[in-house]
Amino acid sequence: MDAEISADIRRRAEEALDRPSPRGPDLDVRSFPPASPAVPLEELISRGSLLRRVGIDPLGASRSGSYLQADEGQAIASSGTPGLRVSTLSQALESGEADPYYWRAVPVDRDKYTAAAELFGGRVGYFFVAEAGARIERPVQSCFLMTTPGSLQAPHNIIVVEEGAELHVVAGCLTMMGRPGLHAGVSEFYVKRGGRLTYTMIHSWSEETHVRPRTGVIVEEGGEYVSHYVNMTPVASLQTDPVVRLVGEGARAHLSSVIVAPGRSVMDVGGTAVLGAPGTSAEIVSRIVAKDGADVANRALIRAEAPGSRGHVECNGLLLSDDSRIATIPVLDAAVRDVELTHEAAVGKLDEEQIFYLMSRGFHEEEAVGMLVRGFMSVRLEGLPEELSRQIESAISMAAAGL
Amino acid sequence: MLEVSGLRAEVDGREVVRGASLTLGEGEVALLLGPNGSGKSSLIQTLLGNPRYEVTGGRISLDGRDLTGAPPDERAAAGLGAVFQMPPSIRGITLRSLLRKLAERFGSDYGELEDLAGEMGAAHLLDRDLHVGFSGGEMKRAEVLLLMAQRPKVSLLDEPDSGVDLESLPVIGRAIAAFLEGDGPKAFQRRSALVVTHTGHIARYLRASRAFVMIDGTIRCFGDATAVLEDVERLGFEGCARCLRGELVEDGC
């Protein structure tokens, strides 16, 4: 990378290192030193069942490529599929391949977490490229494990889907052995003309983990970005607001989140779509289940800047106990006349009539409640390989069963 | 089989079932008639154990077993099942998934249910969320399928003919009739049903022996189904109520 650009990025990061995020509990990023895992990555991977929970195939046999990383240290990147290039970010920066994409979809000085990723993160993370016209059916996977107590994991990930290509990515993140820490991953995704990227992310953190993902997506003409996010377990705190910019005519985005917030989880989860070109459309759907003292803010923002664009927000929250809280904040922002922006939102408890109805059909009260909670968490899964749909369904079922 | 005696129930402190009594024999199909607001649906909901309906007196028993205070799932396990008049819409639970679960629980054949769904013109509903955006006729078809999966000894059918288009009525009527006929022609092999009907339209498909008339929260009379239906048609429920003055009389009004 050009030395001047590189120095400029570092300077901006340094300036932002004390800039708090406007949302979510503020953390001192310096108090989470990056670490290498005490246990070799290969050994961690051999504990397959934990990885499978978050949609990861430990051996990668069913995948078109794999990237696995523990803490800030070891990483394994591999691909055996024509049309798909998989490398670590540092490799891609060395070769110059990643230069046009580095800090272009997420500003490095957005807040202290992006700054920490640049300054402390050591440029680990993955670089996936689906080459022009390549339609890669089998998903490529990425897995982030946190194993060292009190440490920072700040990978920087970049996905490029070239013109007319199609790529499915499944990202699984988990803390092993219930250890605390800070995960502040940066993800920059670029979907070029007519390309299609689906991104499935399954999180299984621990009650002591702070999570601050920073995601930016840029979608060009006729491209499509689909993301499905499932958070299965309690966290200490989670704050994220992926920003999808639809910059080319007819580009589309669909973002769904299924968030389980048990325990003392503090979450501020959102999604932002900018309809920046004519005929673009975005849909943001979320299902939040809060219980036992959880506090969740659920945001969704669609901004329409070009004529003929359409957006829809659907935020539903379910409170399973009186001591938890869900605030849903849908925002529709239209800067031109010829647009169609709509939202529906509902927060409440389970409907007694529905519980009675299922009980009258022979289900115990607990079964009826379980069925309704699982039903509430269902979202439409479109355009995914069947295996990924099944994995999402199963993660949602496990999350529901854990409530 | 099903015995209801002196049943009283309140909703939000308002008494809606006021000392209702009726019996339903093995394999018997009976109609429950009455004007709007007379308490027919309230009676059905109370029999099913809807917690909104607080029982303040009387008794419900099935095959000699007291179900008066039993939770709804125990009543279902004991052999009570229903077609709801206004079932709730449930997002995220498809008709198919619920049929499967019921088939497993009550030992019915899921493949057969799928065939029946086809015959009833309800195959397109299987993968839809239960009752979400269903038309009146679709709702009844789905309810009847769920009832069949549950295979109750006693079916409580709350207005299976209301809000149903002309095309759906015979489909629903015949399906219910076939289901109630059960495994054989003899009475003990048949299933019992209490069928709430406001219009009486469903009656022509069912082999109903008796009809009960409910007025102001109580059963005012019962008698031969055909005779009672004729009387109601001739005199209206008002006339029916006048001629009885609260007395229970056999063989119609």
Image (tube, coloured by chain):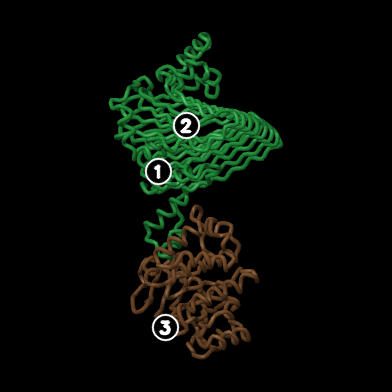
> Label 1: few (<14), some or many (≥20) within 10 Å?
many
The numbered dot on residue B79 is none
Question: Where does the image place residue A242, in percent across and percent down from the top left?
Answer: 51, 31
Give the camera-side residue of A257 and A301: A257
Question: Where does the image place residue B51, in percent across and percent down from the top left?
Answer: 41, 64
Residue A231 vertical position relative to residue A40 in the rendered view, above or below: below
Q: Which chain is green?
A: A
Image mark 2: chain:
A
Give the quarter of the image for residue B226.
Answer: bottom right
Q: Which residue is located at x 35 percent, y 26 percent?
A: A71
Image mark 1: chain:
A
Give the camera-side residue of B8 and B104: B104
Q: Give me the C-alpha separation between circle 1 and circle 3.
A: 53 Å
Q: Which chain is brown?
A: B
Q: Which residue is located at x 39 percent, y 80 percent?
A: B1
Question: Where does the image place residue A228, in percent across and percent down from the top left?
Answer: 50, 39
Taking the image as drawn, is residue B128 in sight? yes
Relative to A338, A377 lies left or right: left
Disc 2 is placed on an element classified as: strand
Disc 3 is placed on an element classified as: helix
Residue of label 3: B188
The numbered dot on residue A240 is 2
* Earlier sequence position, callout 2 versus callout 1: 2
